[in-house]
Image (cartoon, helix red, strand yellow):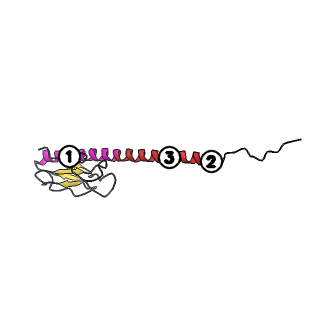
Amino acid sequence: MKKTYLYSQGFTLLELLVTISIIGILIAIGSVSFSTAQKRGRDSRRRADLKAIQKSLEQCYSLSSTYPISLAGVGSAITCSSETTMRAVPADPKSSTQAYIKVGTWGVGYQLCADLEDDGSWTGAEQDICVYNQQ
């Protein structure tokens, strides 16, 4: 005589719930790490952009003994004495239309600042980065 089994070969509901919850926890941890890496990458880009703008403005000073009166905005060129020192002023990496913060007396000097995402707000603290005229 054959015995019939009422139980099928498969996973129980409890096993499925435990597996799904473990996968959910791993996804949550991974997404936090990914967003932190994105913030650091954008901050690194901001530092590099400010240094590039600074080099362009200093090259402008060496050509004409004065800094530009102002920066026209995102995507515009920096031109001094009919020489283009930067083809397009970069925008903030998080917003393609937002420019970096400009402070200072243009023509005589400049100060460009960027708000880094690590500190969360514009505080002027060491987490925020500024570049100044070197002449």
* Left or right of 38, for residue 90: left
Left or right of residue 105: residue 7: right
Residue 17 on the magenta span: no
Is 45 within the magenta? yes
Circle 3 — which element? Answer: helix
Q: Nearer the viewer, residue 87 or 114?
A: 114
* Disc 2, SS: helix
Residue at mark 2 to residue at mark 3: CA–CA distance: 17 Å
Is residue 122 shown left or right of residue 10? left
Kind of residue at badge 2: Leu
The kind of residue tagged 3 is Ile
Q: Which of marks 2 and 3 is in front?
A: 2
- Name the residue tied to disc 1: 54
Above/below status of 18 relative to 105:
above
Q: Residue 25, percent across and down?
A: 50, 46
Question: Which amino acid is tagged 1?
Answer: Gln
Could you say whether the residue bearing mark 1 is in a helix, strand or loop? helix
- Quick one: label 1 or label 2, which is nearer the N terminus? 2
Q: Give the range drawn in magenta.
A: 40-64
Q: Position of residue 80 (x, y in %)?
A: 16, 51
| Quarter of the figure with the N terminus | top right
Which residue, given by chain and number where applicable, does mark 3 sit on?
Answer: 25
Image coords of residue 46 (percent x, y):
28, 47
| Between discs 2 and 3, the one toward the N terminus | 2
Name the residue at the right extreme: 1
Q: Mark 2 points at which residue?
A: 14
Q: Residue 26 carries which label?
A: none
